[in-house]
Structure formats: C-alpha cells, structure tokens
C-alpha cells in the first residue's frame, strides 16, 4: 500500500517535533556547564574575542535600542549588553535553567525581565523597537524558517529593527548524518548525547532568503565563522503598490 502524502507529511513533522524537543532538552541539561565552554569549539579564543568586539561595536552603533525583545536569551550572554543600551529588555527562552542563570547574571538591573517560552510555538503579545537573537537562527530548521520570521515581524513596531549574531560552524564529530543534514549530535560532560539542529548558514545566501521574505537585512561577515545581521522590514516603493 502506498502511503498517503498527508500521512507522510504528518510523520515528517512528528519527527521534526521530536528533534526540536530533544534540542530543547539538550540546552536544559547543558545549562550548568554552558558558561564553562560557551565558546565555539574549534575556533580560537583570539577569533572569538575579535568577533565579540565587532558585535559590541555594532550594538553601540545601533543604540539607543528602545524596548528590546531578546529571543533565545540563554544564560544572558548578550542580555546585559542590550539592557545597557535599551530602555527595557524582555528575554525569552525555553529553558528555565538558562533563565535562572540569566537573571542572576543581569542582576541588579531593573529594566530586564524574563519569561519561559517555546519559540516554535511563540505568538508575540506586544511589539518592540528592537529584536535580538544570538546564536539561535542556526538552530531553526528550514521547515520553520519562514514561520519564525513571520513571528518576528509581528513582534516589531513599524520602524523596528532586528539584529542577530550567529555562525554556520559544525565540527566533523557533530555531523552524525553527514554534512548534507542539519541534524547534529552533541555531548555533555557526563557523556549523554542529544540531537539538535545546526544549519550551515552562509551570510550571502541568508541575506537573499530574508529578502525573499520581505526583509531588508544586511548580513555582514565577522572573523570566520561568525556573522551578524541588522535591518528591518523592507519598505515598499510607491510603484510596487500600484
């Protein structure tokens, strides 16, 4: 018997949901050790330091940020920097363990709040001037890329801006399904293994994909393998509205 297309699609989506649940479980389990080795494996500390300085310069150039929404804030790696340049910061993450660390790291600032949220089921409840996510976009599978950016669009004020930082770096050890797959495997210090998503993003192709979705975001390379994007919704020209 030939499987019905709808049934095959449902099975595929069920497998994707299971993968994303495992990814969320990995970051919950990793929270206690995250700050011990938060750098990108295989990238020199000098390269990572240079990228951090470039990101700080970009945030300085973008400031003031107004009301900020930080998606997948993790342990607050960028939250303090955003709070220092914004009026308020709302940090969302699926891991309560990460949020606890983030809250401790950003205290005693009074312009920061956190909330536990599954970003793949997230519906914004208000609009913000600036949306930021660091090292999150590469964990969004291709099947959820458009819907994620639609949610980002609905969280922005009319002139709101988006900034993201990421890398497309995957180690050979992670590529358990080969370089053509975005499914990787990562291990904790205790040896436990988890599957996760890591898309091999590339700045130029990412910028084109965002343009096709109606965004005007310039994706700029940083010291390899890092990059950042900054921009907003594309403004329609008068002739396009005729």
Image (tube, rainbow, N blue to C red):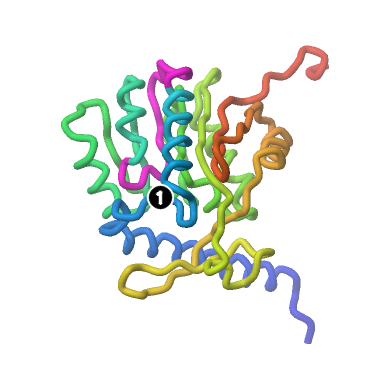
72 is within the stretch colored magenta? yes
Disc 1 is placed on an element classified as: loop
User: Horizontal placement of 71 versus 146: left or right?
Assistant: left
Q: Which residue is mark 1?
A: 39
Quadrant of the drawing holding the C terminus: top right
What segment is highlighted magenta in the picture? 60-76
- x and y, in percent, of residue 100 in the image: 23, 48
Taking depth in this image into account, of 183 and 189 the one nearest to the observer is 189
149 left or right, relative to 78:
right
Rendered location of residue 116, percent (x, y): 33, 48
Q: Front-most of 209 and 12?
A: 209
Q: Which residue is at a point 40% across and 36% down the rendered structure image?
A: 70
The residue under the point 65% across, 69% down is 178
Query: What is the quadrant of the N terminus in the image?
Result: bottom right
Q: Residue at x 45, y 52 (%)?
A: 40
Circle 1 residues within 10 Å: few <14, some 14–19, many ≥20: few
């Amino acid at each position: 018997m030939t499987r019905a297309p709808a049934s095959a699609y449902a099975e595929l989506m069920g497998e994707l949901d299971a993968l994303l649940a495992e990814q969320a479980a990995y970051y919950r389990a990793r929270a206690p050790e995250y700050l011990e080795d938060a750098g990108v494996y295989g990238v020199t500390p000098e390269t990572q330091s240079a990228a951090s300085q470039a990101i700080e310069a970009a945030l300085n150039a973008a400031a003031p940020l107004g009301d900020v929404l930080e998606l997948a804030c993790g342990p607050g790696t960028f939250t303090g920097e955003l709070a220092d340049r914004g009026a308020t910061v709302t940090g969302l993450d699926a891991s309560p363990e990460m949020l606890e660390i983030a809250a401790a790291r950003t205290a005693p600032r009074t312009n920061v709040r956190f909330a536990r949220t599954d970003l793949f089921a997230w519906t914004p409840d208000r609009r913000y001037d600036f949306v930021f996510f660091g090292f999150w976009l590469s964990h969004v599978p291709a099947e959820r890329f458009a819907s994620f950016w639609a949610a980002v669009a609905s969280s922005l004020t009319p002139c709101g801006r988006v900034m993201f930082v990421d890398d497309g770096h995957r180690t050979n050890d992670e590529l358990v399904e080969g370089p053509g797959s975005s499914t990787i495997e990562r291990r904790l210090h205790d040896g436990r293994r988890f599957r996760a998503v890591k898309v091999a993003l590339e700045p130029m192709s990412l910028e084109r994909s965002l343009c096709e979705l109606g965004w005007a975001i310039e994706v700029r390379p940083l010291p390899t393998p890092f990059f950042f994007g900054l921009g907003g919704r594309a403004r329609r020209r008068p002739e396009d509205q005729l």
